[in-house]
Image: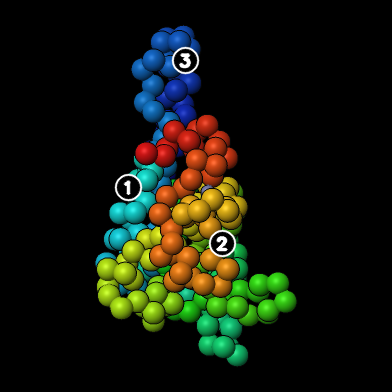
Amino acid sequence: MRAQHLRGLGPLFAVAVLLGGVLAVAAEAPASPERVVAIVPLGRVKQEYLERIAQELQARMNVRVRIDARRELPKAAYYAPRRRWRAERILDWLDETPPEGAWKVIAVTEAELSTTKGKIPDWGIAGLGTIGGRNCVLSAYLYKKHSRTKEALLRRLGDVAVHEFGHTLGFPHCEVKGCVMSDAKGKAIKSADESTGHYCATCLGLLAPEDRALVK
Ligand SMILES: [Zn+2]
Ligand SMILES: [Zn+2]
């Protein structure tokens, strides 16, 4: 529905420009179409995890965050030798079957994720995001396993969501102390706990002007 509505704006704008002149239209035109971030649960994911991630995103960005219907994990991403799921294959699959109308996609699972890291063919990770792309994926698996309280789990999960989302905004890993874009270097828990949960000024400086306006 939303996408149809947005498509409908094109001809309307064209007519308005012809009748009213560009300046008048610019003054009255609605703000650019709202950016939608879709949170896509893969397999069974606790609602409170999804809501916490939505809340963390909403606290930082002027975007509309939507929680989509659950999808099953793609079989092509299953890595049988370790009984876990290859994150880069999940990202490829999301590229092939994108949720409608989503500017960015945050896929969330409770299953264990892995990817290739340097010489290690299958390395367990908390999340993976495409730099400057649409999609990222993250897992509650490690945080569920290693968090003593639910609040610690939710805080760490929110942190990794902001981190992976940052990759989609174009941010690489960052050396600034406390920046949410720090490289976990294999220590997902320590990294989440040392993070302020925010993008530092250096990272934000990398944003395109139209994206900078979305940051609260
Ligand atoms: Zn990262
Ligand atoms: Zn930074």
Q: Which amino acid does label 2 sit on?
A: Asp
Q: Which amino acid does label 3 sit on?
A: Val
Q: Is residue 206 above or below residue 9?
A: below
Q: Which of marks 2 and 1 is nearer the N terminus?
A: 1
Q: Residue at horizontal 39%, vertical 79%?
A: 146
The Cα atoms of the two marked residues, 2 and 1, are separated by 23 Å
Can you tell which mark lies on residue 59?
A: 1
Whether ligand 1 has any atom under 8 Å from the Cβ at mark 2 is answered as yes
Q: Residue at horizontal 39%, vertical 15%?
A: 27
Q: Residue under circle 3?
A: 17
Mark 1, secondary structure of its residue: helix
Instruction: Give the residue at the far right of this rendering.
Output: 119
The Cα atoms of the two marked residues, 3 and 1, are separated by 35 Å
Q: Is residue 115 above or below residue 4?
A: below
Instruction: Please tell me how crowded label 2 is: few (under 14), some (14-19), or many (20+) other residues with Cα within 10 Å.
Output: some
Q: Residue at horizontal 40%, vertical 46%?
A: 36
Q: Residue under circle 2?
A: 183
Residue 96 in percent (x, y) is at 58, 61
Q: Closer to the camera: disc 3 or disc 2?
A: 2
Is residue 29 visible in the rendered image? The answer is: yes
Q: Which of marks 3 and 1 is nearer the N terminus?
A: 3
